Image (cartoon, rainbow, N blue to C red):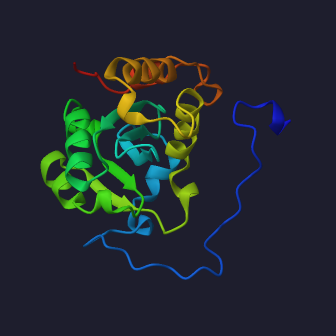
Amino acid sequence: MINLLRRAHKKRKAKGIGRKERKTKIPNRIPIDARPKSVESRHRYGHWEGDSLISRKSKAALNTLTERKSRLVLITKLHKKGAAETNKAIINRLKKLPATGRQTLTLDNGTENAKHEQLSAKLGIRCYFAHPYASWERGTNENINGLIRWYLPKGTDFSKIDAELITRIEYLLNSRPRKCLGYKTPLEAAASSVALRD
């Protein structure tokens, strides 16, 4: 059955076993173990996962944010994958939401997330970090990234992708009915939870 799915790959195996963990360069990181258990239930809107999609062809990258309950995705082009650029993108996208719509943000251990304390100060959001080599702990965002790659496959030069196309991809993903949402779209699921402002 798995070969009939849009993303027809085998289930990933845990890669962390037997691998020597690298020391993180992120100061004062709060591990995902400290994240409220209620986040796992997806009952409340406002819990996000974040990641970066990179291009081998250029320094340009994409920042992606996915809300856990509604599966709403926000995609922003970065001229380069740095901490300052990443923070600016996240702040610009999430500041449009009320405080209840931006409660937690779960990130990986990339250096682009090193200034997470600034995000907390600016947005009032609590940032948590997944364990190294444990991408499944941000599975919602990882799944969405896979769907984005269907439109922008590996090898795509993000520097040549304009804002109009990114907006179009974001709209298509957010307008796609999901079985896990009772066949609502992410936009419909989000609208029922929080009033989105322009």
Q: Residue furthest right?
A: 1
Q: On the rendered structure, is 97 left or right of 105?
A: left
User: What is the x, y in percent for residue 171?
Assistant: 43, 18
Seen in the picture, residue 86 relative to 165 is either above or below; the reply is below
Q: Residue at x 41, y 47 (%)?
A: 52
Which corner quadrant holds the C terminus? top left
Question: In which quadrant will I find the N terminus?
Answer: top right
Q: Residue furthest front?
A: 57
* 9 horizontally vs 142: left or right: right
- How many numbered circles does the render carry? 0
Front in this rendered view, residue 79 or 134: 79
Image coordinates of residue 127 in percent, x first then y, are: 30, 57
Q: Nearer the viewer, residue 133 or 175?
A: 133
Q: Residue at x 29, y 46 (%)?
A: 80
The residue sitting at 39% across, 69% down in the picture is 31
* As drawn, 85 above or below 175: below
Q: Position of residue 71 (x, y in %)?
A: 49, 33
Residue lying furthest left:
122
- Where is residue 194, by image quadrant? top left
Residue under the image location 49 percent in, 18 percent down:
172
In the image, residue 95 sits, relative to residue 41, either above or below, namely above
Residue 176 in the figure: left or right of residue 92:
right
Q: Quadrant of residue 178?
A: top right
Nearer to us in this view, 91 or 81:
81
- The x and y percentages for residue 165 are 40, 19
